[in-house]
Every structure is written in C-alpha cells, then in structure tokens.
Image: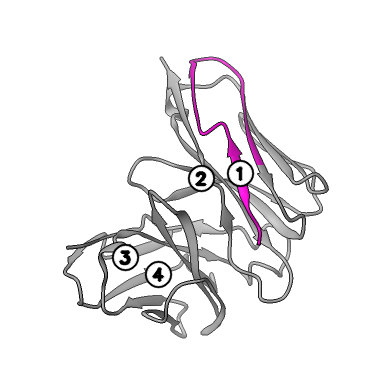
Amino acid sequence: KAGVTQTPRYLIKTRGQQVTLSCSPISGHRSVSWYQQTPGQGLQFLFEYFSETQRNKGNFPGRFSGRQFSNSRSEMNVSTLELGDSALYLCASSLTDPRKGLPGNNEQFFGPGTRLTVL
Amino acid sequence: KQEVTQIPAALSVPEGENLVLNCSFTDSAIYNLQWFRQDPGKGLTSLLLIQSSQREQTSGRLNASLDKSSGRSTLYIAASQPGDSATYLCAVLPSGGGADGLTFGKGTHLIIQP
C-alpha cells in the first residue's frame, strides 16, 4: 500500500509569489492535516480536513489556505509569499477523523514533505 | 494552550545501550499520544500510538508508556543500534471543542555511536 505522497518535493519561489502544494493520502484515508516545520518554531499545525470540510485551523494568517477534494486529495496554497514562509510542509493522513473511530484508526501517517524556499 | 516538552534535547550513547526519552505535556485532555522519528530532511515515521485510555504500547525494541494524569510519556529503546540515530518527536492530539491538530515537542536528537 502506497504511503502519503506530496508534490512537488522541492520548490523555490520569490517573495510575493503564490504557491500550491499537493498531498495524496494513503488509499482509503479520509482525514488530511497539514503542518509547517521550521528550525525555530518546530512543527506547527496548519489545518485539518475530513470529508472535504475544514475541521480545524491553526494560528496562521489568511494567506494560508487549503482544500480537500472528493477523492481525499488535498492542496494547500500560500499567497503573497514572505521569506519566513520558507519551511518543510508536511501532510498527514489518517483513516478516520483523528478524534473518532476505533483505536488504531486515528493514527496519523506523514508524507515526505515539500521543501519550500522563498528568496 | 497545550505545550509539549522533550528532555533531553540531544543524547549520544554507545551502541547496545538501553535508553529512555522523556516527553511531558501540560494539559491532560488528550485523545492520544504518538511517537515519531525523523531522519534529516525527511518526513515523520510513526513509531507508536497510545490512546488516552491506554498505559503503554510496544513494537519490537520500542516501548512507550503514558501517564495522562501526570502529563508524561516515555519512549524506551532497548539494545540501541546505529540505525536508531534520528530525531524522536512526541506529539499529543488535544481533545475538546475547537481543538488543534497534533501538538509536537521540539524533539530529542539521538546519536548511537558504533
């Protein structure tokens, strides 16, 4: 069974541009979450989607947005890029809503990440 | 606001030793706790998941315990090997309305010397 895949793996953009990152969850998984990882702040929660609905959103500005499609694939978009947006963006999937379901069905599995560099 | 702390921040031990990594969290209202490892420049690999009603989980040489009331978890690694070298991250999933996603600690950077 294929794991979580993220595309592209690496991106270089300049300030002011926008970027779209893609995440394909493990087959059958319906929940997708996004995280930003930086050396200074560590891993921080961006948003969580379940059945095409945003369930939670972390403390990030409105420049960060996302969506989930009917096949559970998810995209996140960052507009008007800033230098501080340079980070590893990680996507995670779980079989069910992480706060529900049978024990073991809410384990979250991460993809390899997209490394975004903003110049 | 939930905060997760991992001690020590870094650890270097010779191969073959048993070791314990510590994780503490400030709010006991959690659904579960997960331990991950991260290799340099890579994503996270899930090691163990402990539901809030459980006390421990085991997988091979790894054993994780959870004491929700005291806000503590430990990851025990038996007979360490050089391939265990990585950063180990602890994360809790808060419960309650309007809850965020996983809250992570800053990790323990582990080096196993051959």
Amino acid carrying label 1: it is Thr
* Chain for numbered disc 1: B
Identify the residue shown where x is 59% and y is 40%: B6
- Between circles 4 and 3, the one closer to the viewer is 3
Q: What residue lies at 43% left-to-right and 28% top-to-bottom? A: B83
User: Does residue A99 show up magenta in the picture?
Assistant: no
Residues tagged 1 and 2 counted as in contact (Cβ below 8 A): yes
Q: In this picture, is A48 found above or below A68?
A: above
- The x and y percentages for residue B109 are 46, 33
Which numbered marker is on residue B5? 1
Residue A62 horizontal/vertical position (percent): 41, 81
Q: Residues within 10 Å of mark 4 (few under 14, many from 20)?
A: many
Task: Give the quarter of the figure containing the C terminus of chain B.
Answer: top left
Give me the C-alpha separation between circle 4 and circle 3: 22 Å
Q: Residue at x 76, y 60 (%)?
A: B29
Q: Position of residue A110 (x, y in %)?
A: 46, 57
Rounded to the nearest angstrom, the CA distance separating label 4 from label 2 is: 26 Å
Q: Which residue is mark 4?
A: A24
Packing grade of label 2 (10 A; few <14, some 14-19, many >=20) is many
Task: State how far apart marks 3 and 2 are (Cα).
Answer: 19 Å
Q: Secondary structure at mark 1?
A: strand
The stretch of residues the image draws in magenta is B1-23
Q: Which residue is mark 2?
A: B106
Q: Nearer the viewer, residue A91 or B107?
A: B107
Q: Please name the predominant secondary structure of the magenta segment in the image.
A: strand
* Relative to A105, A68 lies left or right: left
Residue at image position (40%, 69%) is A24
Q: Secondary structure at mark 3?
A: helix
**Disc 3 residue type (three-letter):** Asp
